[in-house]
Amino acid sequence: MHIISTNISKIKTVVHNGKEVKTGIFKTPTNEPVVIEKLNIIGDEQADLVNHGGIDKAVYAFSHNHYDYWKRTLKNDDLAVGSFGENFTILELDEKNIHIGDRIRVGTALLEVSQPRVPCFKLAIALNNKQSLKLFTQYYHTGVYFRVLEQGVAKTGDAVTIEHKAKHNISVTTLFQAFFDKQYPDYESVLLAALELPELALEWQTKIKKKLSLELHQ
């Protein structure tokens, strides 16, 4: 794995459904090295600090390999890196083989996998496609959110290496699919096992508990 592109953005205001929306999703490539700190990347801004950025979502990476699928699906051959709001576009980043709690060296920074990405309406704005949220959820290739264990610097071309593999079989894809796919076999066992992982982001712990509680009382 290696970095194809590093992407950052300032907060922008756009009009969506007749209302002004502030967002930092419109990432564009930068030719300069980026500095990765505990809560975010220097120079990268998030408008909604409740749902973006912070300890468990300090860095977001998306696989360059997914772009061909999305170019075909969205019928947009001009889809540029950074279009999914990712800080790092990484070659061969495979969510099926990346597990919650894996520790990954990106440039000189050490990152820890914290959760899958759940798309919000701003992705639909960025991709200019109302169906993109549904399509993104059904594709199950969500990209990866990281927390920062060791601050550092990264640039285009830097190697991305797994330094520590978690000792369980709950990948980013497995967790996301178990949560959203109603046909996923034995999804409850997967979600219960995920709750035992101390590395799992608080947001996802809360989501899983709520989902299991609702289903228990149905």
Image (cartoon, rainbow, N blue to C red):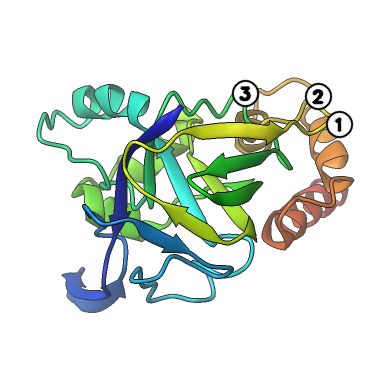
Real-space Cα distance between discs 3 and 2?
20 Å
Residue 114 visible, this orientation:
no
Residue 63 position (above or below residue 130): above
Compare marks 3 and 1 and give the one earlier in the sequence: 3
Q: Residues within 10 Å of mark 3 (few under 14, many from 20)?
A: some
Q: Secondary structure at mark 2?
A: loop
Residue 160 visible, this orientation:
yes
Instruction: Tell me: 33 left or right of 154.
Output: left
The percent coordinates of residue 159 (x first, y second) are 46, 33
Decide which of 43, 48 is in the foreground and name it: 43
Write down the quadrant of residue 30 in the picture: bottom left
Q: Residue at x 56, y 60 (%)?
A: 57
Disc 3 versus disc 2: nearer the observer: 3
According to the image, label 2 marks what residue?
A: 186
Q: Residue at x 77, y 55 (%)?
A: 205
According to the image, label 3 marks what residue?
A: 97
Instruction: Tell me: 201 left or right of 41.
Output: right
Instruction: Tell me: 22 left or right of 172.
Output: left
Q: Secondary structure at mark 1?
A: helix
Residue 128 position (above or below residue 68): below
Amino acid type at image mark 1 = Ser
Do callouts 2 and 1 mark residues in contact (Cβ within 8 Å)?
Answer: yes
Disc 3 versus disc 1: nearer the observer: 3
Q: Residues within 10 Å of mark 1 (few under 14, many from 20)?
A: few
Q: Secondary structure at mark 3?
A: loop
Amino acid type at image mark 2 = Asp
Q: Residue at x 34, y 30 (%)?
A: 64
Q: Residue at x 17, y 37 (%)?
A: 79
Amino acid type at image mark 3 = Asn
Q: Residues within 10 Å of mark 2 (few under 14, many from 20)?
A: few
According to the image, label 1 marks what residue?
A: 189
